[in-house]
Image (cartoon, rainbow, N blue to C red):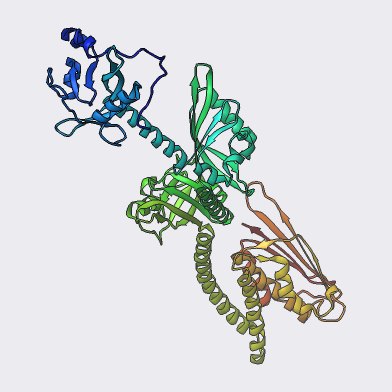
Amino acid sequence: MTVVDLQPRPARKPASGFSALAAVDQDVLDAVPIAIAVFDRFGGIVRLNKSASVLLHLPPHVDNSTAVNLALADDSGPAQGSLARSIIAEFTPRYGLELTLVSPDGARRALLADIEPLFESSFAATGAIACLRDVTDSKLAAEAALAQQKDIEDFFENGAVGLHLVSSEGVILRANQAELKLLGYEKEEYIGQPIARFHADGDVIEDILRRLSLGESLHRHPARLKAKDGSIRHVEITSNANFGAQGFKNTRCFTVDVSDQFETAAAARATEQNAREVLEALPAAIYTTDAEGRVTFFNQAAVAFSGRTPVIGTDEWCVTWRLYEADGTPLPHDQCPMAVSLREGRPIRGVQAIAERPDGSRVPFMPYPTPLFDADGKVIGGINMLVDISALKDAEREQRILIDELNHRVKNTLSTVQSISAQTLRSTPEPAQFAPNFQDRIIALAKAHDLLTKRRWTGVSLGELVDQEVGPFVGPDPYRLVLDGPEITLSPRIGLALGMVLHELASNARQFGSLQGESGVVRLKWTLSKAEDGPSRLQMSWVEHGGPEVTVPSRHGFGCRLIERSITDDLDGSVKVNFPASGFRCELEFPLP
């Protein structure tokens, strides 16, 4: 509309004509603080006050019918002449009329005009009088405010992030398109409903509203919302409350959908958990650190290995209490293989170290530190595996002992073989008997070696040794050999010497004693006595009966001399032999270190 009537006004008498206005002093008109202009019946300006002169860019004194570039605000055409003529013709005043003034320099100003027709006494319309107000600034301000309001509305309605308002009673007052799209609801299905209806966790929304009502602001508060299709959307809510004179009015909430990030994070957590479970299940001690060497994870094998529970975020470089080089030199933690690996950004392999537990025990180990990198190749941490090589060290030590023992035994065996050959030769009058006698004794020695080899030269069972050396002379009847004694493990040195002794005793029984016939028996008994201030001592008793009558020999043969030398010289023991008619007897005694 061209004319805006700002307010209703009561009917008024027509204004006086020019003759009445002519009587008004110019100084009085100039004192009026609003622009006043008088038009003739043709629309020309015939008089104006000082304010109108400034506003319309006209001189204080105008000629009759002075024109000015004045147009209707809606640009529907010139206003000056036609408007005045219209008012005069229609005998109708106009109030709140919006006009546009174009100044000589082309600038436009917005005016608000109140115009009334002028009449003479004859009631003939002679012109019009107008009050003009410059409303350019207020119009621009109103337009700016309207544009700003539209921008705010557009921001709320079409913003990329969900936005909603909730009343103090928990009812949704307003929601934008992003919020509705997030959950799949139409506006009428969402607005006006209780906000708790759309939350998967009632206690969460209850806590959110309570905290907001107390003036607290929430930043990225996690929540779960129920979509129309039944799915759950993970969101983060940033919100505060609007308070008025009556207190809490409504909330202002931004809702950001983080479902994809939540699923990604959940998958990452699951992957990390699976990796931790794998590391936890490994029997080797494993731990991880950050780039500065602070421990971030360790498995239970690491606890068992180090003899302590590491402190996450506090322990640095290694989970062990103290460290030493392989040669026993103290090794500071910041110089351990893991520290070197992180500093140099490379795996460390092929080194050994020693870990000391809080209880003082030490564990030799091999570390396998490996740095971890991010996508840009920057070291972000490391992982280390500590392999206990105690068994390897024990095996190496046993191997050294075995080699030393073997060297010693080989020398002793060669010496024994040499002695056996010499003694057998001297005690065998018939050359044809030398080979069988010598071979039997070498076989007995070899059998003892076989038993020790099976035990990796760590020892030999006395029972096994008796079965190996005496069993072949007894034959198929096991009742001809009666054994009585506890299970005892003999050292390699004692096993070899005693094996030769048992062979000589069995061989003698087979040739001359109770094992010569079909019914003789050998009883072998042994006991172990404990000494308070020395090693235990083994007593063995070899008793034969049921064989041919025994006579005392005129001299000791090679077998007796071998038994005596083996027990007395090699084992630092004693030997007693008796020759009762009922059967040969031999008593042996020697220490067990």
Q: Nearer the viewer, residue 370 or 144?
A: 144
Residue 184 pos. (x, y %): 58, 47
Q: Is residue 461 above or below residue 151?
A: below
Residue occupying the far front of the picture: 122
Residue 396 pos. (x, y %): 50, 64
Q: Residue at x 36, y 52 (%)?
A: 379
Q: Is residue 263 above or below residue 549?
A: above
The quadrant holding residue 89 is top left
Residue occupying the far bottom of the picture: 432
Is residue 97 left or right of 280 when viewed as pictured? left
Q: Nearer the viewer, residue 204 or 312?
A: 204
Q: Is residue 116 above or below residue 195?
A: above
Q: Nearer the viewer, residue 487 or 551?
A: 487
Residue 127 pos. (x, y %): 25, 20
Q: Residue at x 77, y 61 (%)?
A: 485
Q: Is residue 172 above or below residue 290?
A: above
- Is residue 255 in sight in this rendering? yes
Residue 327 pos. (x, y %): 40, 54
Q: Which quadrant, please, contains the N terminus?
A: top left
- Is residue 309 in sight in this rendering? no
Q: Which quadrant, please, contains the C terminus?
A: bottom right
What count of labels does the image hold? 0
Is residue 232 left or right of 312 when viewed as pictured? right
Q: Nearer the viewer, residue 256 or 510?
A: 256
